[in-house]
Amino acid sequence: MSALTSSVKAMVFDTFGSVVDWRASIVRDLSGWGAENGCTANWAELADKWRGKYQPRMQEVRSGKRAWTILDVLHRESLDELLPEFGLEHLTTTQRDHINRVWHRLDAWPDAVAGLSRLKSRYILGPLSNGNVALLTDIAKYSALPWDVILSTELFRCYKPQPQSYLGVCNILGLAPGEVMMCAAHNDDLRAARAVGLKTAFWPRPQEYGPTQTTNLVATEQWDVIAKDIRDLARQMGV
């Protein structure tokens, strides 16, 4: 057992893009729903523009411009703004609710469940995501993610990359920052976690944003672990 694997007690995972394939899942889900309900739209473009509003919406909360608001509500506000652009302003409240909850129905990347299951044999596992608790619980149930605990930034009323996101996880697990590893396919998430003392692990998801992705294709810094995927992460963490 290496010094790294013996010191880490818990591994927490960014979820959107790192563990689950949000873009392809949304396109598949809404394409099927649209066909059944007579709704035609460019679902890939909708997914991209919807995700494009993700950080700006959260920044309103981070900055104090608006009170704490969970991600489900932020997603719904963004969706309502976008629907007229796609000719979908006629959708009912029930239909809009169904579309908004597509974020609760995301498929795991092919390596995720197997890799996480191996890691669970030694480490405490949970998501550390900006998704709210209900959202993350539904994703876990939908995709059979083997978490030990659901760790949402909702618990700390903040959004990553605010420091209290990462330190809140350490506090709630009763662990020192150096005993917790932040695991993600996003370099900026790892940079913020490392700044407050967490260990870090990276793997790329070059298709997260589709075929034209230009970011997070490689590790931009020397993280504690740089893996090919979550199965490779498990191998490097000794399981």
Image (cartoon, helix red, strand yellow):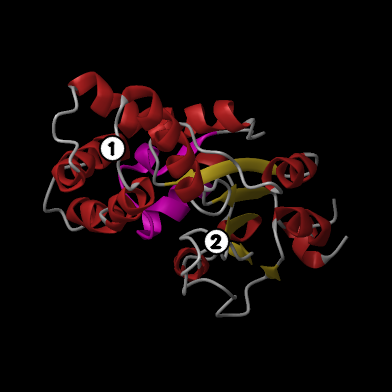
Q: Is residue 106 left or right of residue 230?
A: left
Q: Is residue 53 left or right of residue 164?
A: left
Q: Is residue 166 left or right of residue 222?
A: left
Type of amino acid under label 2: Gln
Q: Is residue 164 magenta?
A: yes
In the rendered structure, which segment of residues is drawn in magenta?
150-170
Q: CA distance from mark 1 to mark 2?
A: 27 Å
User: Residue 187: percent from the left, percent from the top?
Assistant: 50, 70
SS assignment at label 1: loop
How many C-alpha atoms fall within 10 Å of the one at disc 2: few (<14), some, or many (≥20)?
some
User: Residue 88: percent from the left, percent from the top?
Assistant: 19, 36
| Residue located 17% across and 38% down the image | 80
Q: Is residue 207 left or right of residue 160?
A: right
Type of amino acid under label 1: Ile
User: Residue 239: percent from the left, percent from the top?
Assistant: 85, 50
Q: Is residue 111 magenta?
A: no
The image's mark for residue 207 is: 2
Q: Is residue 207 above or below residue 35?
A: below
Whichever of callouts 1 and 2 sits on the residue coming sooner in the sequence is 1
User: Residue 190: percent from the left, percent from the top?
Assistant: 52, 66
Is residue 11 visible in this depiction of the protein?
yes
| Residue located 57% across and 66% down the image | 206
> Which quadrant: the N terminus?
bottom right
The image's mark for residue 70 is: 1
Q: Is residue 23 above or below residue 143?
A: below
Q: Is residue 155 above or below residue 134?
A: below
